[in-house]
Image (cartoon, grey):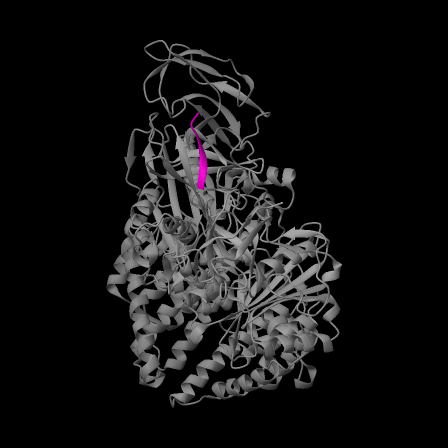
Amino acid sequence: MTKGRVVGINGNMVTVEVAGDVTMNEVAYVSCAGKKLKSEVIRIRGRLAEMQVFEMSRGIGVGDEVEFTAELLSVRLGPGLLAQVYDGLQNPLPELAAQCGFFLERGVYLSPLDEKKEWPFTPAAKPGDTVTAGDALGTVPEGIFSHRIMVPFQFREPLRVERIVPAGSYRILDTIAELSDEKGNRFPVTMTFTWPVKRPVTCYRERLRPIEPLVTQIRIIDTFIPIARGGTYCIPGPFGAGKTVLQQVTSRNADVDIVIIAACGERAGEVVETLREFPKLADPRTGRMLMERTIIICNTSSMPVAAREASVYTAITLAEYYRQMGLHILLLADSTSRWAQALREMSGRLEEIPGEEAFPAYLESVIAAFYERAGLVRLRDKGTGSITIGGTVSPAGGNFDEPVTQSTLKVVGAFHGLSRERSDARKYPAIHPLESWSKYPGLIHAAGTEYARDILFRGNEASQMMKVVGEEGTSLEDYELYLKSEFIDSVYLQQDSYDPVDAAVPTERQRHVFRLLFTVLISRFDFHTKEMARFFFNQLRQKFLDYNGSPWRSDDFTRYEDEIRAFLETKRSGEDEEGGRILKQLGGESEGNPS
Amino acid sequence: MKKIYSRIEAIAGNVITVHAGGVRNGELAVVRSAHGSSLAEVIRLYEQKVSLQVFAGSRGISTGDRVRFLGHPMRVSFSADLLGRIFDGSGRPRDRGPELDENMIEIGGPAVNPAQRIIPRNMIRTNIPMIDLFNSLVESQKLPVFSVSGEPYNPLLARIALQAEVDLIILGGMGLKHDDYLYFRETLEKGGALNRTVFFVHTASDPIVECLLVPDIALAVAEGFALQGRKVLVLLSDMTNFADALKEIAITMEQVPSNRGYPGDLYSQLAARYEKAVDFSGAGSITILGVTTMPGDDVTHPVPDNTGYITEGQYYLKNGRIEPFGSLSRLKQLVNSKTRADHRALMDSMITLYAAFKESLEKKAMGFKMTDWDRKLLKYGVIFEREMMDLSVNIPLEAALDNGWRILASCFSPEETRLRSELLRKYWPSREGGAD
């Protein structure tokens, strides 16, 4: 094992004189006051290795001993990851609390998985089979999933199954199979193995284009700026615009198997809400507890900065592991700006030549490489699995022109820009409907959303104009357009995440409600005055809001819909022809009332 | 006994470099010069080269002065004796009282394990309607007061200190004007709160490095008391001075600046302090109220901007009032459902109407026609500003809620408030005709 001694300390960067070979991104431990502090090699110059320490560097002295492990920064994979709360280095926080109390003690590293727990293993392979990285050797039940015990991802060559244990209870470190290669080398395999976090897992057949919508049950997203399974999206926004609430709502309602939350450099208080509430919240999809299909990686803002970078990689590696089982995973990273800042801090200490706003020049490629680990893949067993990444960005001063937002926008498939203006007006979710975009197909026929977007756009223009010339200077036609755009905003784009019904709108209901909304949008009215138009839309809005708050297909729902249609007829004088054609395309069930 | 080094190799800004062995990162040293002695902290090591920042500043330090390493990092004495005392940024008494050296604890300790935190649940009453009613302060919250220089933020802090329902107050002053320091002392003394207060004060004329220590030292003491089960309120004024001190040291150390000269780790540095706010399950709590002055009233300036991302909302002080827009307490939803049934609804309704008043005001300024509704709003806005927003209003939450209903009733008919009928039936003042 290579050893070294500390020769310099600058913040959380330690310079080490090495005797022997050293690998880039290798993990090493610095001995300090009887503790071994985990670090990672980030630059090598001659016999000097520069390392970032994942802990507070106070107390380290020149001459302290360093042990290199020859291993890259890795995570432990195996059954029992779900429902865990880890720090950025995969230390289980509740266990750490049980051992160390209120504070995070440095130099304490616990096993990420319960090594004593017994799992009922059912073999899927038999002696003589040829297997390779990622193939299932058997399964164990983990919560609602059948967790595949796979050939470790390191074995890229075909291997022969020599021996496999019969069905029964085993612990993760028990040998469950023996494999051999062509030369006759035998490899014992357990239910767990490690994988370096910065290397993407690629044990799949091919990557597919993400085209299937990932339903979040948030109307503005699913209808207007959709995300896709295996796609990527980002949520930039100034502070106080509701990034975190949006992430929380998404984590509860998104139509995926597993949600991984990477709380990276954000407030501890926000993680605490998830930590304390998820174990009590029922999962609307399965009826079990939400926590059972969630993993939380949390490296909050006051925890050591170097581990912040590790936390997003830890999260994506766990996601890749579960994707190999044919599951759909949503990774929510809050916030990628904090991770970029951690890179900037380290780059500064390394005295690299700074790029824009002192971020390192490689910022863009690092961000791109991270988002590229998302994707929909066809596995070797023909099943599919996906990772969708949603990252929040916290731009300095709320200005989207800064480097992190811009680098992110280049690589994501959808952009959900939050606006201070909308959050100040308490219009939630505060996603700006006109500035945001998505390259993925949505739940609703594109012609329909385009038509609605056009009304939003022209209505917005009319409202801008009205601010200059006043209501009295606006034509009735423009005024009606303005009212329609406001109507879309208040009954469709805004959504009350605290209302039990309105908080989550499933696909079928969204399609249905959109058709009703669309009927309003294409209608021509004969209003005589602006007061009359305003009064009509106010009434209509009130009815529509009640409609949004009534359970799907309930009596109230039917009644409100009938009321809305009847009320619409009182003033309706016809409809836009093009709109009428599109309405037919929106199709689905007949025009009539729901059963 | 530790060795004494008497050869200072370099002096730049407040940072000196000596040749020494066996020194640890973050260790403390004493620098003795012709002008007295000062503490210094190790901030960088390279082989035998040790860089230290000198708390009292490097002015007057000679290359021949003596440096003695103490073998431990910065510590502060922690005991009940601290109460009622006033110290400077490095923990020396500034009130002519005795030096304290019992039970020394390290400052700038590790972060709290997120798994050990609990969801905040208790409101801290301040008797200021703009806080209690509209942006409730919550135990364990971290909240800055965003303010332009010249606003009465220190009187506001002093008043909150006097009236807030907490066990202990710890005041950390950074770059405080001497007058303001005296103001705090006198106000708390007059209010009889001095014996439950500890001061750590760095005034504008004190050495800049000591400014950096104030939040850490104040929060270390707060943490000590909180672990004993006390409810501690920490007031920090002004965190922009702290950030400027960081900037100064970073530039002296030739770090690459990121935004307007501030170091790249400004966010982490601020977060490390604000995140000390905590509600320990089974012990006490720390609530942090800081002041962040905004140079040029610019909320996108790096200090308020980074602060906004860290804290749980902010109070926005403008024209001597806490602005309803721009002010936000993220945690208020956790407590204001438990105070009185009408609290949330009244809060929303009054703010919505005030926003409408602002629009009418704008319309009026642009010369558009005023409707009846506009005139009602204009009347309401004036009363609202006088009876709710004015900082001199000093009433408990319940009285403020009652007054809110009175204000609404004096300006509007019940249905114009968009409040739910059951609330109107219960709370609408009867003099005006009762419920619909």
Q: Toward the viewer: A147 or B319?
A: B319
State which quadrant residue A562 falls in: bottom left
Q: Which residue is drawn at 36% across and 29% down?
A: A383
Up the image or down, B362 lies above or below A359; here it is below
Relative image position of residue A544 (x, y in whole percent): 46, 64
Quarter of the image containing the N terminus of chain B?
top right
Left/right placement of residue B53 relative to residue A181 reads right
Left/right placement of residue B318 relative to residue A203 reads right
Observer able to see residue A285: no
Tell me which secondary structure the magenta stretch mostly adopts: strand
Q: Residue at x 45, y 88 (%)?
A: B371
Relative image position of residue B150 (x, y in whole percent): 51, 80
Residue extent of the magenta highlight = A1-7
Q: Toward the viewer: A33 or B134?
A: A33
Observer able to see residue B70: yes
Magenta stretch holds residue A588: no
Magenta stretch holds residue A4: yes
Left/right placement of residue B370 relative to residue B39 reads left
Q: Which residue is drawn at 28% across and 59% down?
A: A450
State which quadrant residue A581 falls in: bottom left
> How many circles with numbers are drawn on the protein?
0
State which quadrant residue A384 falls in: top left
Quarter of the image containing the C terminus of chain B?
bottom right
Relative image position of residue A494 (x, y in whole percent): 44, 62
Relative image position of residue A319 (x, y in whole percent): 42, 37
Up the image or down, B48 lies above or below A121; here it is below
Q: Toward the viewer: B343 or B315?
A: B315
Q: Which residue is drawn at 32% across and 71% down?
A: A459
